[in-house]
Image: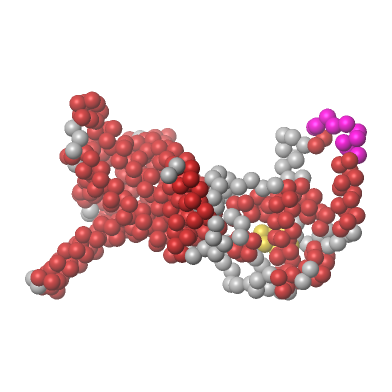
Amino acid sequence: MPLTSLKDRVETLVWAPARTTGLVRLARTVLILGRDLAFGQLTLRAMGLVYTTLLSIVPLLALSFSVLKAFGVTNQIQPMLLNLLEPLGEKGADVALRITGFIENMNVGVLGAVGLALLLYTSISLIQKIEESLNYIWHAPRTRSLGERFTRYLTVLMVGPILVFAALGATATVMSIELVQGLMAVDVMSQALQTLSRLVPYLLISGAFTFIYLFMPNTRVRLWPALVGGAVGGIAWQTAGWAFAVFIAGSNNYAAIYASFAILILFMIWLYLSWLVLLFGASVAFYVQHPEYLYLRGGEPRLSNRMRELLALSIMELVAMRFIQGETAPSQQAFTEHLKVPSHVLMVVLDELERKAMVVATADDPCLYLPARDPARILLVDVLQAVRAADEDGFLSPSAVPTSAAVDRLVTQLLEAAATSLGGMSLHDLVVQGGAASALPSPAAPV
């Protein structure tokens, strides 16, 4: 069977059904994830994280584990690094030993103000890079404020290591309890506990991934999608570590080709795989929370002028209807669920409506949208003109195009015809005359 024919059959089977069952959604998710890995930016962003990691790993670990001196667990840094670098085999021990040596030799007191500032910048650059990559996956174009980013980064640097060692210590404490030791004397319970102990690394790394997916993106991530993404990422990370260890054990050519650089090459490859798995798990969580992004064509969807006008009128209708009826103002998620359009597409129109003073966003988290003024004073022709003239105040505007007088007259006639056709109709008229209350869903609690 030709590949093109097989591809057409798969697309017909997966994308043709109008009703999306759980199996169809799973198949679509797998295909989209494969497309993102093959043609998306996940691989490029994973490479960028590898470069940033090489620059910041020593300062980051030095700052993170400095807080652990008060707890007397600094001697556990090297064992933890050994666990993380276990897929490298014997070479992982050498890398862990060198990183630990760099950390021990770092004396913050002799760096001075400029040196300390550079150390802090190098340390937080990795966390910032992770946030930017996750924001890309979650289509979150808006960045956090400087103060909020500083607070979150310090939390990761200071609290993260404490949570890691607390989890490891709790696991060791549970296994040393006298009751657990007695249960391990029983054959059946011993096998069950041994199986559970093998699952502990999966649970810990899945929990760490889940925390990152909930904490880092500049958008609201629900718990269930983060758990699914964390579980997939944790299993994939452990599986990739096992496969990489098998590959290292069966390949002796790297040392012969790269000599002393072999350790660095293998370390960079493992870093790349680790970051790629982290971003892959984030993509899984994103598609679980936003199934509306599961569409066949690749790349970012582009809005036609007609789609911009349709979305602008639909958004303003929903905002005015909720306002007139005294109901909860809609959020971005409410628009997405009602219009079945990806959120970043809606944000293109929402941002323009907000910039042209058609709607205002509240300070809530997530923000809610209200009419900028009385809906009876918002003309529909102004709403259409707001999205039609989007981005005209940039480097290119209609006044900069040398058009003929005939073209200018035609454009003016079209605008006048639209205004005459709408007849001064306001947003309030659209809600009342259009029967919006029966067409739109009843509001739920703020999403």
Q: Position of residue 194 (x, y in %)?
A: 16, 64
In the rendering, at what x and y percent does residue 412 appear? 89, 43
In the depicted structure, whether residue 205 falls above or below residue 133: below
Q: Residue at x 83, y 58 (%)?
A: 379
Residue in the foreground of this view, choosing between 16 and 353: 16
| Residue drawn at 52 percent across, 63 percent down | 20
Locate residue 164: give its quadrant: bottom left
Which residue is pictured at 70% across the width and 47% down the height?
304
Which span is picked out in magenta? 400-409
Based on the picture, tell me whether residue 407 belongs to the magenta stretch: yes
Whether residue 286 is visible here, answered yes or no, is no
Q: How is the image coloured?
A: secondary structure
In the image, taking residue 9 as reference, residue 101 lies left or right, namely left
**377 left or right of 130 in image:** right
| Residue 13 is inside the magenta segment | no
Left or right, 297 with respect to 173, comes to: right
Q: Nearer the viewer, residue 100 or 129?
A: 129
Q: Which quadrant would the N terminus be assigned to in this image? A: top left
Q: Position of residue 380 (x, y in %)?
A: 81, 58
Give the camera-side residue of 110 and 78. Answer: 78
Q: Position of residue 182 (x, y in %)?
A: 10, 73
